[in-house]
Structures are given as C-alpha cells and as structure tokens.
Image (cartoon, helix red, strand yellow):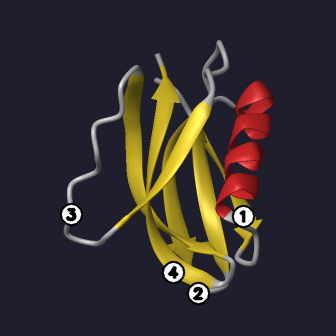
C-alpha cells in the first residue's frame, strides 16, 4: 500500500504558481492525490509516495456544485477546495495523458 505525504502551501499564491509547485513536488514527492484547505491559513497538497512522477498538471477553477469540465487528453485527478491569492476556490486538477 502506498503512503502519502502532505505539504502546506501559502494561501497568497496564484493558480499558475500552485500548478508549478504541484509539478515540482511530483518530481520527488509522488503523484498528486488531493488538494484541500487547512484552518483557513494554508492549502494542503497530498501525494501518494509512488513513482514514476506524473506528467504535466492542469488546474481549473470550477464553481461549487458544478461538475468539472472534460478536458481533451487529460485525466481528472481530484477536486478540492484551496486558497488562491488569499481567496477560497474550488479547483479541479488534471494530469496530461
């Protein structure tokens, strides 16, 4: 069974910066499995400690209650709430096929 690792991310970063952090951490931390808020002060990203590292990550903001959009040649990894530039957002994370 795979173990997981969770990392806190500053709430004031932008969506593209969050994507870059996720991709960077996948190179040594494993595959992204979850994005979630933590006590209104951090975004947590959780990885399964597996190899090989993933491919390019795509993040899309979605409205709560809406289904995430289908994106050609990408697989939905997870949907989670996080902080983008200090504001709570719902994000869908995709990995390129």
Spatial CA distance of label 3 from label 4 is 16 Å
Q: Position of residue 66 (x, y in %)?
A: 21, 63
Q: Which residue is mark 3?
A: 66
Q: Position of residue 83 (x, y in %)?
A: 59, 75
Q: Tell which circle, 4 or 1, labels the residue nearer the N-terminal end.
A: 1
Q: Which residue is mark 1?
A: 8
Q: Are marks 4 and 2 in contact (CB under 8 Å)?
A: yes
Q: Tell which circle, 3 or 4, labels the residue nearer the N-terminal end.
A: 3
| Element class at badge 1 | strand
| Element class at badge 4 | strand
Spatial CA distance of label 4 from label 1 is 15 Å
Mark toward the viewer: 3 or 4 = 3
* 83, 37: nearer the viewer: 83
Mark toward the viewer: 2 or 3 = 3
Q: Please rate how many residues cluster around mark 4, counting C-alpha atoms within 10 Å: few if below 14, some from 14 to 19, many from 20.
A: some
Mark toward the viewer: 4 or 1 = 4
Residue sitting at x 65%, y 12%: 52
Q: Is residue 13 above or below residue 34?
A: below
Q: Is residue 33 above or below residue 2?
A: below
Residue 78 lies left or right of residue 29; in this view the side is left
Q: Position of residue 14 (x, y in %)?
A: 71, 66
Q: Which residue is mark 2?
A: 40
């Amino acid at each position: 069974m795979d173990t997981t690792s969770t990392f806190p991310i500053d709430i004031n970063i932008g969506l593209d910066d969050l994507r870059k952090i996720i991709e960077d951490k996948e190179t040594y931390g494993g595959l992204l499995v979850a994005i979630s808020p933590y006590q209104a002060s951090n975004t947590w990203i959780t990885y399964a400690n597996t190899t090989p590292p993933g491919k390019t990550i795509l993040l899309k903001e979605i409205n709560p209650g809406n289904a995430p959009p289908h994106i050609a040649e990408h697989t939905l990894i997870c949907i989670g709430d996080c902080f983008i530039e200090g504001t709570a957002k719902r994000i869908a994370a995709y990995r390129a096929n």
